[in-house]
Image: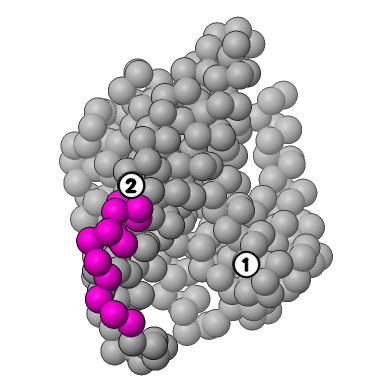
Amino acid sequence: MTFAMIIAGLAFLLAGGEALVHGSVAVATRLGISPLMIGLTLVGFGTSAPELFTSVQAALAGSSGIAVGNIVGSNIANILLILGLVALFMPIATQRTALIRDGALLVGSALLFSALCYAGQLGIMAGTVLLAGLAGYLLLLWTQERHKPETSQPETAAPSQDALLPSVAFTIGGIALVMLGARFLVSGAIDLARIWGTPESVIGLTIVAIGTSLPELATSIVAAIRKQPDVAFGNVVGSNIFNVLAIGGTTALVTPLTVPPDMLTFDIPIMIAVSFALVIVAWTGSRIVRLEGAFLLAGFGIHQLLLWT
């Protein structure tokens, strides 16, 4: 029953996240919202919706280990697992101009989140600081990107209300599925931790974190197959920044989070280290090659093995 709840939760999260992204983007497009703002907000929010709802649900259930472990574990999995797999398909090229901005924000957001964790309980003040950082990040992106020329789009007739209804229904249905999936996944994860006698933080860092990263994994693999590895790189970097700022901030505002001591001494330093390593590797070589992808995957395997031993 426990495994059935976890599998059902993961399935609902994946399906709901996909429906939420497609539905919200379709609604925004029909309402005339610019593609830039869609990419910066709706797509990023949608692909991270599973992490958001799962962490909030876990926090409300009194499982801070799962809530924080989901954030930290997802960031580690995004870099080591997802980029490692994509790099095995084909080298990931990076643009240095974008890397200066986004790489600095990636490392900076990880350091900010970590500093707040080491300060003690993540509460209202920490949540406010993280969400303020998210607002600053989005404002910076909008300010820098809004002057770039948009790809010309063919003119289309204004959409009717009937054309909007299916997209709105898709969006609402996606939210409902994500919420239901988060409830199933958290309940199953808590039960599994009790049955196995495993700390909830370990379950959050492994099963829950990997499960909630499935939308990013699917998006990045598809991008690699379509020979757009730079999309996969941007997806991972943006998702990691959003995870610590938006999900960490929102969850901390909902209810105070107590960070497990073992996460402070092991997993959070690893999250910082892999964030630094990603920027250094991408900067020095201007791309992530297959050999480096294999090292990333090996690092992910070692991290998972150490958690379970």
Whole-Å distance between the Cαs marked 2 and 1?
Answer: 27 Å
The answer to whether residue 159 shows anywhere in this view is yes
Give the amino acid at mark 2. Answer: Ala
Give the amino acid at mark 1. Answer: Ala
Residue toward you, 114 or 289: 289
The N terminus lies in quadrant: top right
- The magenta stretch spans which residues? 156-168
Residue 61 position by quadrant: top left
Q: Check residue 28 for magenta coloring.
A: no
The label on residue 169 is 2
Name which residue lies at 60% across and 27% down. Answer: 7
Q: Is residue 138 above or below residue 283?
A: above
Residue 242 position by quadrant: bottom left
N-terminal of the pair, mark 2 or mark 1, is 2
Residue 16 percent location from the top left of the image: 45, 42
Residue 159 placement, left or right of 264: left
Name which residue lies at 59% across and 39% down. Answer: 210
Residue 233 placement, left or right of 242: right
Residue 66 percent location from the top left of the image: 46, 27
The label on residue 223 is 1
Residue toward you, 224 or 199: 224
Residue 57 percent location from the top left of the image: 36, 27
The C terminus lies in quadrant: top right
Dominant SS in magenta: helix
Name which residue lies at 67% across and 71% down. Answer: 226
Q: Which callout, 2 or 1, points to the residue nearer the camera?
A: 2
Residue 56 position by quadrant: top left
